[in-house]
Image: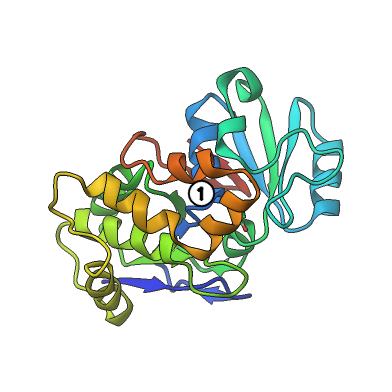
C-alpha cells in the first residue's frame, strides 16, 4: 500500500513502511545534488546551534542550510542546490539544517527505511520502492506546516512511475489532483512541471529573493539515478 502525507508534523509513525521525504524546494533537491556531486554524507539537524555543534566535532565538514530561505551567518553554504558543485562538496560531509525538510526527516519513527525523493531522482526512487516490496509513505514536507503544491506534484510523479501498489486515500487524491496541473503522458511534461512548480507559493518567494534558477533546476525530471538513504543519522548514496 502506498499513501501520501501532505505536510510535516512533529511525529509521524511509519509502521514499518519505507518513507520518502519530499521537499522539492529545496532540501530534497539539494541533498540529491550534493550526494551526486561527491559529498560523502549529508547530516540533517534540526537547529542552527545543533548544526554548529555537529560541525565542530567533525573534520572535513561544511555547514549548510537556510532560515527564511537565506544562508545563516557564518555558514559555508545556503540551501541552493546550485551551490553544491563537485568543487564545493567532493569528499566532504555536509551538516544541513533547513526549515521544513530536516524537520520532516527528524519526525519519522518506526520506518523500515527513509530515503529522499525529488523530481531530479523520481524514477530512481520509484525503482527503489518497487524493489523493497514494502508499504510506502510519500512524506511531503510542505511549507511552514502548509500544503505545498510542488511536493505533492512530485509525489504524484513518483506514484505514476510505481508499478504494483495499491493506493490509500492520500495517494488516490494526489494522483487525481495532479491531473488538473499536469498531463502525465504529454511529451512536454517536464515543461508543465516547471510551469506548475513556478506558480507555487514557495517558488514565488524564492523567485522574489533571486533564486529563480533554483526553481527551474528543482523542477527538472529524472536527472539522477541516486537515492539518498538515511543510515545512522546520515544521508548517504
Ligand atoms: C526547507 O526545508 O524549508 C526548504 O528547503 C526551504 C528552502 O527553500 O530553502
Identify whether 72 is placed above or below 94: below
* Picture residue at 49% right of the left edge, 73% below the top: 147
Image position of 6 (left or right of 209): left
Q: Is mark 1 within 8 Å of ligand 1?
A: yes
Residue extending farthest top: 87
The figure's colour scheme reads rainbow
Is residue 141 or residue 114 the one in the foreground?
141
Asked if one can make out residue 102 in the rendered structure from this viewpoint, the answer is yes
Instruction: From the top left corner, tell me how far across and down residue 9 is, in percent.
Output: 59, 75
Looking at the picture, tell me which residue is in the foreground, 202 or 46.
202
Q: Quadrant of ligand 1?
A: bottom right
* Apparent side of residue 222 relative to residue 200 in the rendered image (left or right): left
* Quarter residue 80 falls in: top right
Name the foreground residue: 57 vs 65: 65
Q: Residue 112: in sight, yes or no?
A: no
**Rendered location of residue 65, percent (x, y):** 70, 46
Residue bearing the label numbered 1: 28
Q: Is residue 61 left or right of residue 134?
A: right
Task: Quadrant for residue 112, please give it.
Answer: bottom left
Amino acid at each position: 500500500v502506498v499513501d501520501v502525507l501532505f505536510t510535516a508534523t512533529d511525529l509521524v509513525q511509519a509502521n514499518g513502511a519505507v518513507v520518502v521525504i519530499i521537499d522539492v524546494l529545496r532540501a530534497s533537491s539539494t541533498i540529491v545534488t550534493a550526494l551526486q556531486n561527491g559529498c560523502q554524507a549529508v547530516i540533517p539537524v534540526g537547529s542552527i546551534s545543533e548544526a554548529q555543534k555537529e560541525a565542530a566535532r567533525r573534520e572535513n565538514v561544511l555547514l549548510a542550510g537556510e532560515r527564511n530561505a537565506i544562508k545563516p551567518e557564518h555558514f559555508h553554504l545556503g540551501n541552493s542546490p546550485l551551490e553544491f558543485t563537485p568543487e564545493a562538496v567532493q569528499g566532504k560531509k555536509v551538516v544541513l539544517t533547513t526549515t521544513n525538510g530536516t524537520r520532516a526527516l527528524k519526525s519519522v519513527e518506526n520506518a523500515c527505511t527513509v530515503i529522499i525523493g525529488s523530481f531530479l531522482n523520481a524514477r530512481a526512487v520509484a525503482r527503489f520502492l518497487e524493489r523493497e516490496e514494502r508499504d510506502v509513505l510519500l512524506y511531503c514536507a510542505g511549507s511552514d506546516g502548509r500544503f505545498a503544491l510542488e511536493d505533492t506534484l512530485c509525489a504524484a510523479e513518483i506514484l505514476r512511475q510505481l508499478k504494483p501498489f495499491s493506493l490509500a486515500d492520500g495517494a488516490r487524491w494526489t494522483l487525481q489532483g495532479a491531473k488538473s496541473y499536469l498531463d502525465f503522458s504529454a511529451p512536454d511534461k517536464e515543461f508543465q512541471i516547471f510551469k506548475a512548480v513556478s506558480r507555487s507559493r514557495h517558488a514565488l518567494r524564492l523567485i522574489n529573493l533571486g533564486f529563480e534558477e533554483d526553481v527551474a533546476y528543482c523542477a527538472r525530471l529524472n536527472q539522477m539515478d541516486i537515492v539518498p538513504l538515511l543510515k545512522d543519522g546520515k544521508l548517504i548514496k
